Image (cartoon, coloured by chain):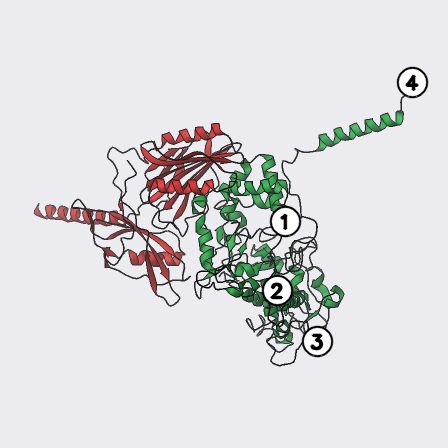
Amino acid sequence: MRKLLYLAACLCLAGAVAWRSSAATMPLANPDDGTVEDGVFKSEYFNLSYPLPPGWIAGLAGPGPSTSGYYVLGSFVPAGELTGTILIAAQDIFFAAKPIDDVMAMTDEFGRTAAKVGGMKIDRPPSAVRIAGRRFGRVDFSGVGLFRSTWTTKIRCHFVSFNLTAGSRALLATLALSLNRLGPADDEETARVDPVCVGGYADAEHLLRKVDPAAVVPAFVPIPVRIVVGGDGSVEHVHVIRATSGQRDSIERALGQWKLKPDEIDGRRTEIETGLVIKFTPTGAVHYLPGNRTAPEAESE
Amino acid sequence: MSRDRSGYSALLASFAFAVAAFALSGPASAQQDPGVRGGPPGAGGSLPNLITCGVNPGCGQAFFTAAQVFFTSVFSVTGGIDDGAALGVTNGGPGLGPRFNLNQCAGCHAQPAAGGTSPRVNPQVAIATLHGANNVVPPFITKNGPVREARFVLNPDGTPDGQVHELYVISGRSDAPGCDIEQENFPAAIAANNVIYRIPTPTFGLGLVEGISDLNLVTAFNSNQALKSQLGVSGHFNINPDDGTITRFGWKAQEKSLLMFSGQAYLVEMGVTNELFPNKRDNETTPSCQFNVLPEDMTIFGTQDPVSPPTGSTASDFSTGIVNFSTFMRLSAPPTPVTSASAVRGSVVFNNIGCQACHVTQQQTAVNGLAFLNSSSNCPPTPAGSSASCEVTLNPYSDFAVHNMGYGLADRVTQGVANGQEFRTAPLWGIGQRIFFLHDGRTTDLVQAILDHASPQSEANAVINNYDLLPPQSKQDLLDFLRSL
């Protein structure tokens, strides 16, 4: 009997270790992992679902992520005649060319840019609106027979934008109303807790252990990398946003071994998400550049 | 009262014809490419205000003129055949082959003037058998098709190739006795889907492009990020692997400078070795096809003007061919646009639907000025109080970055950090007088060229959707605007 109990305890312990290892290595979702199923766009990373307007389908696929952390999450069109389009995009705040991290500042910037385009009319100046429980910056504009509306919100270190284009004001209004159906990716009873966004966290002040990736050509190309750091300071997830396969492998292998000072909020250790840019030189050296610093997350509720 | 039967019959015939024409016609075209803009060439001359040289104030213009003559000269294997005489241009000298695409820079770069792009009649057909050469014209070269170079995507062992494989060999030419190499097997490459094509890029205004500082390129690229983010557009620059600076010439922005472009083209397109590329591509394998001392284009060592009679530009006479070529391009003026009411409306359409996200209208050269312009004599600017304006504003309609153009335009060749789906934003200045479009010259129809921007994974999809949503007149205005450039 004692031997049986001993064996059961060993098996339980082995199972616990295996579960922990598996949980630590289970890949986390990335910003460009969204899917369309049964007429609904879903993104696990952004915890977002968007039922497409009736009769709308996925259009041509967009490009992969850019070196500045810009993603085309989805492009949608009506199934028949083209009367409008919906483009969902995301910009990683850590890597944007301009270090803006406030939704209204981003919306104002877009409004200013649009106003300078000859023949473009701002129909609705940049304004803050609340839709589906989220704070958005909205600006409507039109010109040459096209009516457009850009809605921007901040989710998990990214500006996510819904860019609506229509050949008529009536259709544009319909598309805008469709955003009321935005919701979480999964119906969850408990609120999901995402890592806290902290720009520039992987710096000398916080790095406890660093392993340099082996340099892989091409040199000089900025490689944006997003990492999720666990409560114990281990790197739980490495997302090399854009690189060659050789560079990606090298960086994932190295950064997966990094250790950082755990972050604490109200005395509790918490997961954080941060970004950095890596450049290899022709001599094989590795240069690290911090991503844009960000203000505390305050937009989602 | 009698009827005028002849008039009645004519009226009836006209009516019948109109009915028949209406019945047989398809839907009326909503918009049409107006076609190549007629009239005199809008390009081909020199920049105004070229540098003056003290006692020789016309030195800049003289160098341009002499360099232009060199650009139009015709080359042969040993220099003994003067094919230029029939064309009214000079004998360029030796160096052609052993493999080549054509024997004259201006033969490919011809439309609408020397320095341009592919002409309407392809000179690559006639040269295949010129002077007894044994070549067979490849299937992708036709009399009324674009001038093309061919690149193989993969090597026989499956590793990436991407290099130019010249169309022709000098075997059989009267000035290549004993040379017996074979043409590339293009039918096999085509059957294996292993060949892609490129057409010549126009060279007008490239000195100004070369003079845009990296900082100004980046500034212009970043200035419309908000606009790009609404349209699915991103892009990035191609870079020099040696020093990390931005490269900007060629279909994938793979070339760093006009001199490098000249040297590379001189060797690869015509076979002429030079001081940047001093070895023949077939040097070791085809000794029977080597006829000249190398490099065939070299700096003159003597003190007496080597050109007889002198061209009027000592700088040109003593410079190498590649310096002459690059100087011709550097000193050339950008194309001059024309205007019309429709083109003005079309420019508004161009900006509204998002074409300008990549085809950025304006760029600026470096603040230090351009050494070959007279207006730069006061540059760099003196401290406060200087009124010298050293930056030159140009309108190339390009950000000179590379963008993902999707499956439809992919050529599967990587150059620098531009992958097989990425291409440099083609400058649109001068497009009004171009015949063939896109990197391989696949269409002569601007409407088709616009629509070909859209395919899976292309950054242009949203902008092309905006184009599709336009009313017909706005589309026509856009086409008229493009043909005005």
Identify the disc placed on residue B432: 1
Disc 1 with disc 4 on a shared chain: yes
Instruction: Give the residue at x 76% y 30%.
Output: B18
Mark 1 residue crowding within 10 angstroms, few (<14) / some (14–19) / many (20+): many
Q: Which chain is red?
A: A
Mark 1–mark 4 contact, CB under 8 Å? Answer: no
Counting from the top left corner in percent of width and height, residue B341 is at: 63, 40
User: Which chain is disc 4 placed on?
Assistant: B
Mark 3 → mark 2, Cα distance in angstroms: 20 Å
Identify the disc placed on residue B1: 4
Identify the disc placed on residue B308: 3
Identify the amino acid type marked 2: Phe
Q: Residue furthest right?
A: B2
Counting from the top left corner in percent of width and height, residue B30 is at: 63, 35
Identify the amino acid type marked 3: Ser
Disc 4 with disc 2 on a shared chain: yes
Mark 2–mark 1 contact, CB under 8 Å? Answer: no
Residue B373 seen anywhere in this rendered image of the structure: no
Q: Nearer the viewer, residue B333 or B128?
A: B333
Of pointers 1 and 3, the one earlier in the residue sequence? 3
- What hue does chain B carry in this figure? green
Instruction: Give the residue at x 61% y 49%.
Output: B485
